[in-house]
Structure formats: structure tokens, C-alpha cells
């Protein structure tokens, strides 16, 4: 455990020096700030763009519109930026041979995998949580509404857990590939397969993609969180499988 802790601290220092963590937090906070603002201004923008010639009676934006913008931004641009930033987590170290001295001195390779994964997971959790609280605060300011904290957190939990699966997939792809493209193409390929599986309605709640598709429905109370429990369990099990696969891949890689 001591070796794992040291490697974990090393990863945190490295991610801070490369500005990846700062970039991730900044981007997520921008999305968080924009979500309630876009929801607030959308009716006005539509009216101005149409010059009010159609005399449209647009519904007033609500807190749910703000949360809709939040989840839309995070599950699209947020996940894309996360994949881009972390795609080279392992491949860059392998290509630069920066792990040679550590491995030759007896460092277990599994500690490399776990330290990198825990570092990615911490960054995802902090950035995502900060963006949640910023959106929550601004939404409450612009749209006073009685949305309980339990409902907000219930809608947020599946997205947080999806990151466990996503980061394991990125790390696996980064280890499998010879460059940064592996960390991007493997998650892209798997995502396409999951979208195809999602066409079968009976499998929807078992699909990890349900964790980033039903957040608003859970927030609104139209879908209970318990229905996504199979998807959560599949995502966690798949993450463990991917981490094990990453260790196996690294053990067979020449460093």
C-alpha cells in the first residue's frame, strides 16, 4: 500500500504540472456556469432571432431546463474533453520509456495501473462535483424551485458512476494502443457498440449508457433511481474487468 500511495502522489503531481487537472476543472466549471444562463436566455434568443414575427408564446424556463443543459453539456462535451485529456495517460509513458527505471527496480506493474486510475478518478470526481454545486447554486438563484437535494443527488449519482467505467475504458485503450489514439478510439468503439445495444429496449437499464441518459428523468421523479441499479452494477463490473485487462496488457508490454 505504501508503494501505491507514493505512486498515487506522483500521478497527482504529474497531472498538476501538465495542467490536465486545471484544464478539466476549468472546462467543467464553464459548462456549469453556462447551463442556467443558457436556459434563462433561450426564450429571449429565440424571440430575437425570429424578430417576434410569429408572435410565439414560449414557455418560461424552469430549473429543469437548467439541469437539462447541465447534463447535456457534461455527457457530450464534458466526456469528450475528459477522453482527450486522459487518452495519453499510459501511452505517453510507454512511448517515452519513463517507466523503465521504476519497473527495473522492482515496482509491481499493477501499482502503476491503479495509481493512474485512482488519480483519474479523483480528478473526475472533483471536477464533476464542483460543476454540480455551481450549477445547483446558480439554478436556485435564477429559478427558485422546490427541487429536493435528494432528487439532485439521485440524478447526479449515475453520471458519477459512469465515470468509473469511462476512465477504466480510457486507461485500457491507452495501454492497448501505441499512442494517444488508442485512448480515444477504444472508448469510441465501445460507445458505438453500447448505443447499438441500447436499441434493444429490454437491455436499456443494463446498459452503462443509461447512466448518462436518464439523469433528468430521475431528477424529475419520472424514473426511480433503482431502475438503473443493473446498469450501475454492469458499469462497476466492467470497470474491474477493464482494470484487470489493463494490468495483463501492461505485464506483457515491453518497457
Image (spheres, grey):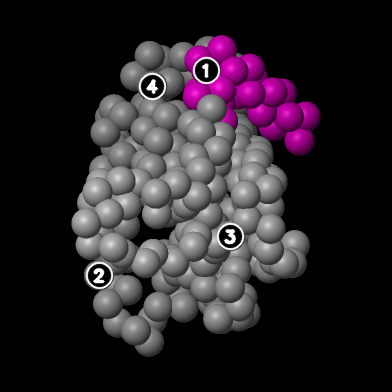
SS at mark 3 in the image: helix
Is residue 200 positioned above or below 174 on the image? below
Task: Kindly report the secondary structure that dominates the magenta region of the rendered protein.
Answer: helix
Is residue 4 positioned above or below 232 on the image? above
SS at mark 4 in the image: helix
- Indicate yes or no whether the magenta region holds residue 45: no
Q: Quadrant of residue 85?
A: top left
The residue indicated by pointer 3 is 63
> Which comes sooner in the sequence, label 4 or label 3?
3
Mark pair 4, 1: CA separation: 15 Å
> Which comes sooner in the sequence, label 1 or label 2?
1
Q: Can residue 175 be seen in the rendering of this structure?
A: no
> Which comes sooner in the sequence, label 4 or label 1?
1
| Residue depth check, mark 4 versus mark 3: number of the one nearer the observer | 3
> Which comes sooner in the sequence, label 1 or label 3?
1
Residue at 50 percent across and 15 percent down: it is 18
SS at mark 2 in the image: helix
SS at mark 1 in the image: loop
* Residue 215 on image: x %, y %: 53, 65
> Which label belongs to residue 92?
4
* Residue 197 on image: x %, y %: 29, 73
Q: Residue furthest right?
A: 2
Amino acid at each position: 500500500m505504501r508503494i501505491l500511495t507514493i505512486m498515487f502522489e506522483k500521478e497527482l503531481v504529474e497531472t498538476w504540472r501538465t495542467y490536465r487537472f486545471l484544464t478539466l476543472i476549468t472546462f467543467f466549471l464553464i459548462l456549469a456556469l453556462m447551463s442556467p444562463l443558457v436556459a434563462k436566455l433561450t426564450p429571449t434568443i429565440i424571440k430575437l432571432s425570429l424578430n417576434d414575427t410569429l408572435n410565439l408564446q414560449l414557455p418560461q424556463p424552469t430549473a429543469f431546463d437548467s439541469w437539462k443543459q447541465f447534463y447535456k453539456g457534461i455527457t457530450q462535451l464534458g466526456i469528450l474533453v475528459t477522453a482527450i485529456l486522459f487518452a495519453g495517460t499510459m501511452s505517453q509513458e510507454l512511448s517515452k520509456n519513463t517507466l523503465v527505471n521504476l519497473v527495473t527496480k522492482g515496482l509491481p506493474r499493477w501499482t502503476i495501473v491503479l495509481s493512474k486510475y485512482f488519480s483519474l478518478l479523483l480528478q473526475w470526481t472533483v471536477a464533476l462535483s464542483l460543476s454540480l454545486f455551481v450549477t445547483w447554486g446558480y439554478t436556485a438563484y435564477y429559478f427558485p424551485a422546490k427541487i429536493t437535494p435528494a432528487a439532485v443527488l439521485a440524478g447526479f449519482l449515475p453520471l458519477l458512476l459512469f465515470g468509473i467505467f469511462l476512465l477504466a475504458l480510457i486507461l485500457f485503450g491507452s495501454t492497448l494502443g501505441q499512442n494517444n489514439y488508442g485512448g480515444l478510439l477504444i472508448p469510441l468503439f465501445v460507445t458505438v457498440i453500447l448505443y447499438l445495444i441500447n436499441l434493444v429496449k429490454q437491455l436499456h437499464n443494463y446498459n452503462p449508457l443509461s447512466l448518462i441518459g436518464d439523469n433528468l428523468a430521475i431528477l424529475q421523479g419520472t424514473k426511480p433511481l433503482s431502475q438503473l441499479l443493473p446498469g450501475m452494477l454492469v458499469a462497476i463490473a466492467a470497470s474491474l474487468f477493464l482494470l484487470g485487462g489493463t494490468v495483463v496488457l501492461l505485464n506483457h508490454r515491453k518497457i
